[in-house]
Image (tube, rainbow, N blue to C red):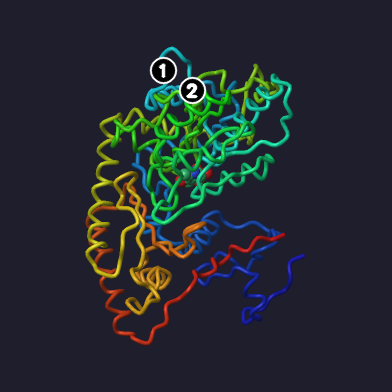
Amino acid sequence: MAKKVTHNGSADSQSRLLSPTYARRAMANPISKREMPEGELDPRVAYQLITDELMLDGNSRLNLATFVTTWMEPEAQELLSQTFDKNMIDKDEYPQTAEIEMRCVQIMSHLWNAPEAETATGCSTIGSSEAAMLGGMALKWRWRDRMRAKGKPADKPNLVMGINVQVCWEKFCRYWEVEPRFVPMEGDRFCLNAEEALKLVDENTIGIVVIMGSTFDGRYENVKEVNDALVNLNKKTGYEVPIHVDAASGGFIAPFLQPDIEWDFRLPLVKSINSSGHKYGLVYPGVGWIVWRDKDQLPEDLIFHCNYLGGDLPNFALNFSRPGNQVIAQYYNFIRLGRNGYFQIQKTCQDVALYLSNQIAEMGPFELISDGSDIPVFAFTVRGEGTGDANFSAYDLSDKIRERGWLIPAYTFPKNREDLAVLRIVVKEGFSRDMADLLVSDLHHAIAYYKSQPTHIPKKAGHTVPGAAFHH
Ligand SMILES: *Cc1c(COP(=O)(O)O)cnc(C)c1O
């Protein structure tokens, strides 16, 4: 039952109840915040209540932390909202949405140079993380079949990757009981290389994950170098270790900005590729993709066939129901922008990233870890932090710049460069050259501020994210 509450109630009642002043006429009483209220609200009041609260979220356009799309055209928004009701799984009810999904897969298989003779296959997902789970499972299943065919035990699979992988690969390994084998960072090498990766490969290796656009600093790993070395190793040992490319960000950058880099199905050992439609695919969250080079790479026993929506629905996914409108928005971008449109947008992002990284390099206290010439993402560190040269840390700068609304994350690199604290900037469509200039000016102000505080002691770690407590 609703508790009786007075308006000058205790702090406790205030934290449990919603009672905005403007709604006094529409809302006779405050309503419970964390329990489902007994009665109804006028829809306009409910709408206002929630929009007001969300004003305290950051402004997504000033969020330089995220890789995820924060701006789409009004026409795309309209299309998205007209198609909210379409359930991606229900291919019998929405056959055109299903058809559009398959067209997107074909578009990507061309974009990623799948050989004509081999028929690529794939599907949409909720993001690259789900795509990684599906890609990883296909690797594991195929490895297990190979081992069984040879009469060998198949109970100790491992996956080789750089320590700079996105957390989804650690999740994959833990959830699907695969031993992760990480190539650590070393000195100025911030990602995996062929030599170190191959040292970790044995007959139980289900695959090597190579990243096109490292989460930590935006750089590309050298897929061709790994492919060529692995071709030799496979020949010498009789292994059949394949490569999966995690192109979460690079999958929609490299084909337009660096078409000559061979990282995709042009390389024979690249058997599958994932990418995030909601990153540089330029769609709002959440849509991701996985494409296999040919049907053999996706074991039949991973595919479920169900008939209770009518018709036979072959399905390989972790989710069942999922929004179809994001897939439609992906197709909108493909036909609306075409290759030239994508090129123009990605090139503009890259120009802004290079301009901004160059400006930051010239400020004095910073050193670039990357400059945005692979994907338009770069990381930089505070030079001589803690040695007396700089009395502020990456964390201080991140906090200071946030006063102006900019979200620029500071974090440390993984093993063996935990000593390195960096700031990272992701340049996306919607972050203009003008905004870059505003940011440059705010960075100058932040530096001047710390100069004026000679006794400031550099902060050692980041803030705890409010509301991020995990209830368990
Ligand atoms: C973002 C990212 C992921 C995870 O993708 P989501 O679409 O957010 O699930 C995986 N790998 C890399 C390299 C990424 O940048």
For the residue pair 327 and 259, the one nearer the viewer reads as: 259
In which quadrant will I find the N terminus? bottom right
Q: What kind of element bears circle 2? A: loop
Name the residue located 28 percent from the left edge and 52 percent from the top edge: 353
On screen, 240 above or below 358?
A: above
- The residue furthest top is 117
Residue 368 in view in this figure: yes
On screen, 465 above or below 94?
A: below
| 450 sits to left or right of 3 | left
Q: Are marks 1 and 2 in contact (CB under 8 Å)?
A: yes
Q: Which residue is mark 2?
A: 293
Name the residue located 38 percent from the left edge and 48 percent from the top edge: 218
Q: Amino acid at mark 1?
A: Pro
Q: Position of residue 434 (x, y in %)?
A: 22, 57
Q: Position of residue 121 (x, y in %)?
A: 51, 21
**Residue 115, label in figure:** 1
**Residue 455, label in figure:** none
